[in-house]
Image (tube, rainbow, N blue to C red):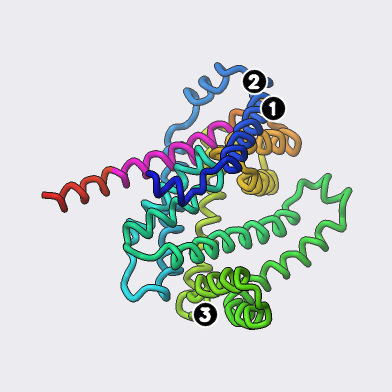
């Protein structure tokens, strides 16, 4: 535990950031739930179609498995042996669990846990985690570009220039995916030009982390996993809309725009995206559709609970039991 605290760098500045995140989450939650009674949310859970809620949880967990598969591929060129898919999945889930309490700390915890489970140096895993997140940011950028094509009609008519902007940004995002494999060569030239040791060290780490992207064998698989993973994130929204009997009140463009806003809310550093997710999703859904603010808040709450809380805690607990059992067997 002491080593983990050291890895997470939980100093005074970190504690202030955590408290600031909690304060922001509290304000957002107050603003959201002041518009609805708790009994309405409980009633919504009671009347929800449980089959679709279970399906949302299953789809969410499968998306974590796909992330683990992608991470195994990212690590492959850096290791002289195979990496356990289960260990990658377990550490991803542990990281997500820590993010529920401490924003942004999950990536460092995930690095620490995987380094211990696979007996690998942290300096080898950390750049790969950075590339893993970089791929997510690029997917989010592409999603933001595409969403401009799915804007509700009244917004698109009032702001016609948005579609031209979307076309330009889509081309830039696509070019980013194409040029990502040549990033190591660019970084190598930059590192030779820059003589500042700290910057050189960071560039070398990133260069090491993107080695897998040079492989024509692995990169298409990594891209396929990335697109499929984000498609499953989108399915979570669809399942919860169906579960709450709201699907007939929305169109594809409304669902896609809501999905984009929900994805962007993850960038706000509140514990487990609590508050920021509820506020941004419910306000967006209420303003671009005919869904009432009550139902919009219920949708955001049910989606967050199933796809952020349950889909994290259940697999994390399962992985913890498996690892504890393996450790117990080794002692016997």
Identify the residue shown where x is 68% and y is 73%: 175
Is 288 magenta? The answer is no
Q: Is residue 42 above or below residue 248?
A: above
Q: CA distance from mark 2 to mark 1?
A: 8 Å
Q: Say which element carries label 2.
A: loop
Which region shows up in magenta? 300-320
| Residue 114 point in image, percent of width and height | 38, 57
Give the mark, 2 or 1, whose residue is nearer the N terminus.
2
Identify the residue shown where x is 46% and y is 38%: 52
Left or right side of 6 for 321: left
Of residues 58 and 77, the one drawn nearer to the viewer in this rendering: 77
Q: Say which element carries label 3.
A: helix
Left or right side of 113 for 245: right
Q: Which mark is residue 331?
A: none
Q: Which mark is residue 214?
A: 3
List the residue tagged with mark 2.
Answer: 36
Specify the quadrant that holds the N terminus: top left
Of residues 134 and 177, the one drawn nearer to the viewer in this rendering: 134
| Residue 83 point in image, percent of width and height | 34, 66
Left or right side of 132 for 118: left
Q: CA distance from mark 3 to mark 2?
A: 52 Å
Say how many tags the image has.
3
Circles 2 and 1 in contact, beta carbons < 8 Å: yes
Q: Is residue 295 above or below residue 257?
A: above
Q: CA distance from mark 3 to mark 1?
A: 48 Å
| Residue 27 point in image, percent of width and height | 67, 28
Q: Which mark is residue 293?
A: 1
Circles 3 and 2 in contact, beta carbons < 8 Å: no
């Amino acid at each position: 535990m002491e080593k983990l605290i050291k890895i997470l760098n939980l100093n005074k500045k970190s504690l202030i950031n955590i408290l600031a995140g909690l304060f922001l989450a509290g304000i957002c939650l107050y603003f959201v739930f002041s518009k609805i009674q708790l009994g309405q949310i409980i009633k919504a859970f009671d009347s929800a179609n449980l089959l679709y809620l279970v399906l949302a949880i299953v789809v969410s967990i499968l998306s974590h498995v796909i992330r683990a598969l992608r991470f195994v591929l990212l690590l492959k060129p850096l290791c002289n042996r195979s990496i356990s898919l289960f260990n990658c999945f377990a550490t991803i889930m542990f990281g997500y669990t820590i993010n529920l309490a401490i924003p942004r700390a999950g990536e460092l915890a995930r690095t620490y846990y995987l380094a211990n489970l696979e007996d690998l140096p942290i300096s080898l895993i950390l750049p790969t985690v950075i590339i893993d997140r970089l791929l997510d940011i690029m997917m989010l950028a592409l999603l933001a570009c595409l969403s401009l094509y799915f804007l509700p009609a009244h917004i698109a008519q009032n702001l016609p220039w948005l579609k031209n902007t979307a076309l330009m940004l889509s081309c830039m995002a696509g070019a980013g995916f194409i040029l990502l494999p040549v990033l190591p060569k660019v970084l190598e030239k930059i590192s030779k030009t820059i003589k500042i040791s700290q910057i050189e060290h960071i560039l070398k780490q990133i260069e090491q982390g993107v080695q897998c992207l040079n492989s024509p064998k692995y990169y298409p698989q990594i891209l396929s996993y990335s697109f499929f993973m984000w498609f499953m994130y989108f399915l979570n929204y669809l399942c919860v809309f169906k579960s709450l009997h709201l699907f007939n009140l929305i169109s594809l463009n409304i669902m896609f725009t809501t999905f984009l806003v929900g994805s962007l809310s993850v960038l706000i550093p509140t514990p487990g995206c609590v508050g920021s997710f509820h506020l941004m999703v419910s306000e967006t859904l209420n303003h671009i559709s005919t869904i009432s603010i009550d139902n919009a808040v219920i949708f955001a709450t049910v989606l967050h609970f199933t796809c952020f809380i349950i889909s994290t805690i259940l697999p994390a607990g399962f992985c913890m039991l498996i690892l504890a059992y393996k450790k117990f067997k080794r002692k016997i």
